[in-house]
Amino acid sequence: MNSLKTMKKSTRSNLVTYGIVIGFYVVMQLLVSGGMLSNSMQGMLVPICTYVVLAVSLNLTVGILGELSLGHAGFMSAGAFSGAVFWVIAGVNMPAPLGLALAMLIGGVVAGVFGFVIGIPVLRLRGDYLAIVTLAFGEIIKNVLNAIYLGWDSNGLHFSLSDSAALNLEEGGEVIINGAIGITGMKKASTFTAGIILVLLTLFVVLNLVNSRAGRAIMSIRDNRIAAEATGINVTKYKLMAFITSAFLAGMAGVLYALNMSALAARKFDYNTSILVLVFVVLGGIGNIRGSIIAAAVLYVLPEMLRGLNDYRMLIYAIILIVVMIFNQSPQVVAWRAQVWEKLSTIGFFQKLAKLKKQSKGEA
Amino acid sequence: MALLEVMNVGIAFGGLQAVAQLDMKIEKGHLYGLIGPNGAGKTTVFNLLTGVYRPTEGDIILDGKNITGNAPAKINQAGIARTFQNIRLFDQMTVLDNVKIGLHNQIKYSMWTGIFRLPGFKDKEQQMEYQAMKLLKIFDLDKEANLPASSLPYGKQRKLEIARALATNPKLLLLDEPAAGMNPSESEELMNTIKFVQKEFDVAILLIEHDMNFVMGICEYIYVLDYGRIIAQGTGESIRNNPKVIAAYLGGD
Amino acid sequence: MEFLSYLINGISLGSVYAIIALGYTMVYGIAKMLNFAHGDVIMVGSYIVFIAVNQMGLPPLVAIVLSMAVCTVLGIVIERFAYKPLRGASSLAVLITAIGVSYLLQNLALLIWGADPKSFTSVVGIPPLHLAGGQLVISGETIVTIVVGAIIMAGLIFFVNNTKMGRAMLAVSEDKGAAQLMGINVNSTIAMTFAIGSALAAVAGVLLCSAYPTLQPTTGAMPGIKAFTAAVFGGIGSIPGAFVGGILLGIIEIMSKAYISTQLADAIVFAVLIIVLLVRPTGLMGKKISEKV
């Protein structure tokens, strides 16, 4: 009986999460059709979806598996470039939704393969060493993509690491990836609707995974690796599973991002982007999927909201980040907050509030 | 043939011989004790048996299969489960989920079934739930099923660890100081539970314990370890009167 | 001869990495945190020197001392206000805060000094050295960098092993709780570590900008990451490890640029790091840690 209730609880909590996303979609569509959303805000809708997917997928690695990754942008760019190449060659001639879906699938698979390759050292390393290796991988992917020249003519694909002339394209051939310049002149394909569908798909995969046998195995590794091994969990298998799933989703997000622009360059996907996504995950609450969604959306829009403050906006962003971390995480501040809360709870109004807080905590 | 045969097993860390010439025989379904003064190497023996450490010499045979040097997860799947001296639960997960992890290799379905909720998912989850709750009831933890494991009081955490280990359906259960930190009445109750588990699950149990009343109370056969070597073995009565054992505990020679 | 000149350049660049990596490694050893903002302290130090020399007309040596002083204070302030409140919090929380500090420093620099790159005039007044009948030319910057790197390394090893404060640092990095029980003031030891690391960052900034004379708010980021890599490469927490890691990284980078590809040099550096960690999971000179069961 008791357990039946929890099943419902986790399902209910998941439904709320899906509801938030769908609600956001409906409200934005209404605002757009009513002409109440500025152009710059409209332009942010697809990137918001991208970063939500990135944050949720990174949370799978950081929050659910419990391993720090600083190379999420690497998976994103591996997906973005492979998906975009497919799009330029073939997808663009298909019906847009099909072309986009196939591009995303390809991007996801390629990123997943990268996840597998990177996952292997991950199994040997722990903590900060792992963090630096993921960062290194991300930078390697960026650097290699920066040096790649890829062209296409009737003989098929041509590849070079030196320059576009070395591709030896025949007449009418086309350079797809032009080294550090990247891919230019792409036809856009991503839409807000496609973005929301990807967000929902990501949520579906991650939430269902977490509430299943495999997800529990992954979380057991996070909570106590030695006990997990002693309980018969194949740590290698489940670490890889989490890593590959996370990379796959990041790759799809990369395609969504890439096909929202006409030009794509690798330098965009450096460790700063990885760190940005990590900040979303940490501020949203490690392991808290709904928190990742909200943090990614709010924090992505925040600098835009602060635009009126011009040069000061990133400064304010930095200060907010530090203050929030100290407020939420400092042992002394946490203790102090508990004290204040206790004092306040003698007052009637706050008692009610405390009750509400308790209830909502039980649900999460 | 014995369930577990340990033959001449030893391990050295650097130059230090932590365990040497260890010979043990454990019969199916019986209850054994492993005692010895602090630092005798008792937990090291557990770590050797469960693959945390790889023996530098000797063989460990479980049910006729040589498991020496296997990885911990494989040894668990072969049939040895354990608890830890410094409790190792999955702290952030619920009490129920802790036991469900134990059932991981008992009730299986694929990742895809989990993600896409394919047929079989609901069925298998219900089976898992049923079996986990059954185990929790034995240890009187069913009311706490949905609390985070870390919120349990100490004694209940020890019991949950045993429940989780049992969920892996072991042939041999290793308990590292199961009664540590319990008061006499809790300890008494745990003794009864362990006896019940031994009969009900037909599992052999080897336990490390400092509480002599506990060990003498339930163990049918006792090994005494000192400086990494077995110095005596036998029934409780013979151990109690063994001068070597008395000397080891009192520190004389 | 060409090879020799690349090797010397590599050692020179490596010395800069080593000096930065020392800051990373000392802080990591003592506070067990990845101080992501360390690279940005380098940038601040370089700006101070730039202003002191170009706008205030101070002699280079005075400018460097001034820059070291400012960075020392900056390091202590950062530690006191951003990191100290988080002592005892999860390492991820500290990491994110360090990232916040990094953003803060970069954007402060942007506000104060603007986004356009400043061209840094070298503070080294030593003429280049011509060897082997002019076939091998070693610039003054290179010589100074290598010499300064060696002096700092020697000085640091002496300091850690032979002074009370240095030994306190070792004790705190070994076991904070035990050190406290032995009467060591852990807080001031940690602050001291940040101070030394930041002062070294100022030196590294000057050397870096003398060799690569463009200065902008993001100047410190990439060398910071590379030096962090060097520290891990050598085994984070180990002072000789940081030095060896830094030098090797510099040599690998310069050699890759010279003989393989300029574009791919960074990728090669990071690939070597990964391979090293696969073979030695705690770096070249790192201590092996095993979890007690």
Image: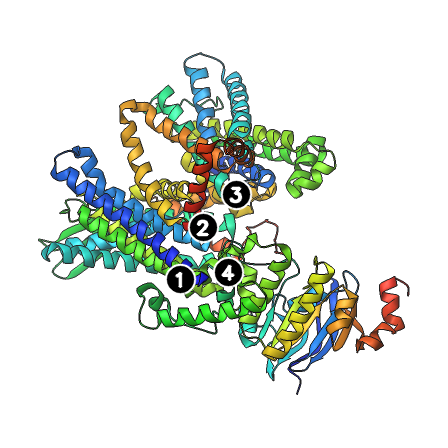
Specify the subunit that label 4 lies on.
B
Front-most of residues B26 and C282: B26
Crowdedness of circle 1 by 10 Å Cα count: few (<14), some, many (20+)?
many
Query: Coloured how?
Result: rainbow
Front residue (pair C240, C149): C240
Please tell me if label 1 and label 2 are on a single chain.
Answer: yes
Quarter-of-image position of residue A209: bottom left
Q: Secondary structure at mark 2?
A: helix
The image shows residue B132 at horizontal and vertical percentages of 50, 68
Q: Which sits earlier in the primary sequence, circle 1 or circle 2?
A: 2
CA–CA distance in space, label 1 to label 4: 28 Å
User: CA–CA distance between discs 1 and 2?
Assistant: 18 Å
Q: Quadrant of residue A51?
A: top left
Please tell me whether residue A66 is drawn above or below residue C16 in the rendered image.
below
Query: Can the viewer see residue C55 in this picture?
Result: yes
Task: Tell us which disc is closer to us: 1 or 2.
Answer: 1
Disc nearest the viewer among 4 and 2: 4
- Disc 2 designates what residue? A133
Task: Give the residue pinned by disc 3.
Answer: C90
Asked if the residue under mark 4 is in contact with the one under mark 3, i.e. CB atoms within 8 Å, the reply is no
